[in-house]
Image (cartoon, grey):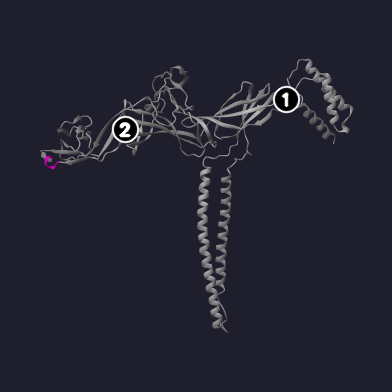
Amino acid sequence: MKNIKKENIVQTVNTNKLTVTKKLSLAEGKELAFQIIDKLDKNMKKTKSITFFLALAISFNLTAQNGGVYDDFIYNNTKPIERKVNNVVSHVTVFNSQAQVTRTAKINLEASGVFNIVFDKLSPYINMNSLEVKANEHLTILSVSSRNDLLNKNEKPADIILLEDSLENIIAALADFKADKETIVHQKDLMLANKNVGSNQSGVKYDELEDLMNLYHKKLDDFKVNWFRLNNMETKYNNYKNAVEQQLAAYNNGKLTLNNEVILTVKSDNKVQDAQIDLSYLVGNVSWQPFYDIRIKDNKSNVQFFLKANITQSTGEDWNNVSLKLTTANPAEGGIKPELQTNWLGFQNNSNNRNISLQEVVISSRAQLIDEDGFDKIQSTSKSNFSKPTISQNMFNTEFETNIAYTIPSDNQNHQVDLTSFAQSAIFGYAVVPKLNKEVFVTAQVLANDLINQISGEANVYFDGTFTGKTIVSPTANDTLLLTLGKDKRIQVDRIKLKDFSSKSFFGNTKKEQTTYEIKVKNTQKDNIVLSIEDQIPVSNNSEIEIKLLEYEGATYDANTGKLTWRLELKADESKSVKFGFEVKHPKDKTLTGY
């Protein structure tokens, strides 16, 4: 009992300390001590207790006289007050395989002191070494730490809770159907096991047998009807179950239990209103992939490039109405140049049976600082209707800062973001490789810019409002990018082997083969076109095989590759043809590969 009363005294003292926020004089200390004593149980009013509180009051005065070792009791005699704050994701920078998330909170502090500001329900994929905090100038950040709240449970929308309840009811109904079917089986087995009637001495009367047969027939019909009814109900409820499970799976895809918390210990010297705190961190399970929509109205218009991105994230955190920055940079990569060490060359030790190779090159690294003032900027020549972000480009990466808010939920699905658009002039043409494909392809030779050379991606190609296929936009060593826009069936091409101009002959041990092809083309369009035709003759890398080009009717010939290229100008409804032939000599006792 004595110990309990002592604990009550200490608790009362601590309670009163919470109300003292200034230095006390001796008189004020005495007054406070007597106020505390008055609140104690009458049985505790003893000389020792009064002496204790008088000593406490004197210590207050000594502290005041010494200028105050501590400014207030809240800071020195109690734990920091903990506040869980409402915070929102305000900005996200998306890298190739992770993202930097910035959360913003605004807090009100009614008095000075030390507080633990808690950002809760954070992703389990946070890199805790990447935490960065920015606070109001009236707040001092004392420390940043993290912890797990394992008791936290995610709040679910009402419709998801309803679906989960429905799933439980469906599963219960299916269990009832299964039990009813088992009951039917047991009843049927029991009836059939007791089908014998009468006895060997007396037998059974006809009327009784007829009644019994009718009963059996009725019962078996009932069993059959109920069995099929339960089967149909099972099928229907299983369909319901699959639909609900798929809906829940779609919701739970990317959803995680958010137990992570970050605690910011801050000190405030004054009352604070609407103080802003920004918490930034790197988080995994995020990626983005660029892609293009390439649109060409006709062969007289510029090529329109629409650069977009698919963002996928399953961090557990939904990004609602956030500003986005997409960058090709990778924070996991260091800008460290390898350094070669001296490679000392020596003789092998013959007494050692092992095979000793030259000493390997040892590579160390040294940090290298890059001055950002040298970064170049580019401007987009966008002509699109969607909002154009800010684009910055330097020698290392390209960044896109959106100026509209996007919502990217944690569902592991692609979410499209518009980045920019630009127009490039092009030289349109038609090309065919009849040896491989007799269809004519429409091509556009586009002048490549810096953005095309840095941002690679798949491209959807639309010509005259029609989707014509996919292509790849990738960096090119040339200044131009060749795009295939689709097939034009209005240009007809045929490749024929001319038998009259092809032959085989033998001379001694040598076999000679002559081959001639004719390529016929017809332009059924109403416009004049320029058609590029590509074909080839074989090339030998063996001295016993001799190849000679006999004719090629104005084609450009590349002797290294054997490639023949014609450039034909065709008027509307005009037809033309070209021929080429070659000769192959080789030993007659050796068989050639196909050509």
Q: Residue at x 24, y 37 (%)?
A: 433
Q: Residue at x 51, y 39 (%)?
A: 411
Residue sticking out furthest to the left: 507
Q: Amino acid at mark 2?
A: Leu
**Other residues around mark 2 within 10 Å, as few (<14) / some (14–19) / many (≥20):** many
User: Does 117 sit left or right of 25 as displayed?
Assistant: left
Residue sticking out furthest to the top: 66
Would you say the residues marked 2 and 1 are in contact, meaning their CB atoms lie under 8 Å apart?
A: no
Which numbered dot is residue 158? Answer: none
Q: Quadrant of residue 318?
A: top right
Up the image or down, 545 lies above or below 160; here it is above
Residue 67 at x, y percent in the picture: 76, 15
Which tag, 2 or 1, sits closer to the chain's start?
1
Which numbered dot is residue 483? Answer: 2
Residue 448 at x, y percent in the picture: 34, 26
Between 454 and 514, the one lying in front of the other is: 454
Up the image or down, 302 lies above or below 26; here it is below
Q: Quadrant of residue 153?
A: top right
Residue 499 part of the magenta-drawn span: yes
Residue 536 at x, y percent in the picture: 21, 35
Indicate the quadrant containing the C terminus: top left, top right, bottom left or bottom right: top left
User: Does 244 sit left or right of 475 as displayed?
Assistant: right
User: Does 345 sit left or right of 437 as displayed?
Assistant: right
Indicate the quadrant containing the N terminus: top left, top right, bottom left or bottom right: top right
Residue 126 part of the magenta-drawn span: no
Q: Residue at x 15, y 38 (%)?
A: 516
The local secondary structure at tag 2 comes to strand
* Magenta residues, dominant SS class: helix
Tell me the magenta residue range: 498-502
Which numbered dot is residue 74? Answer: 1
Q: Quadrant of residue 583?
A: top left
Q: Amino acid at mark 1?
A: Ile
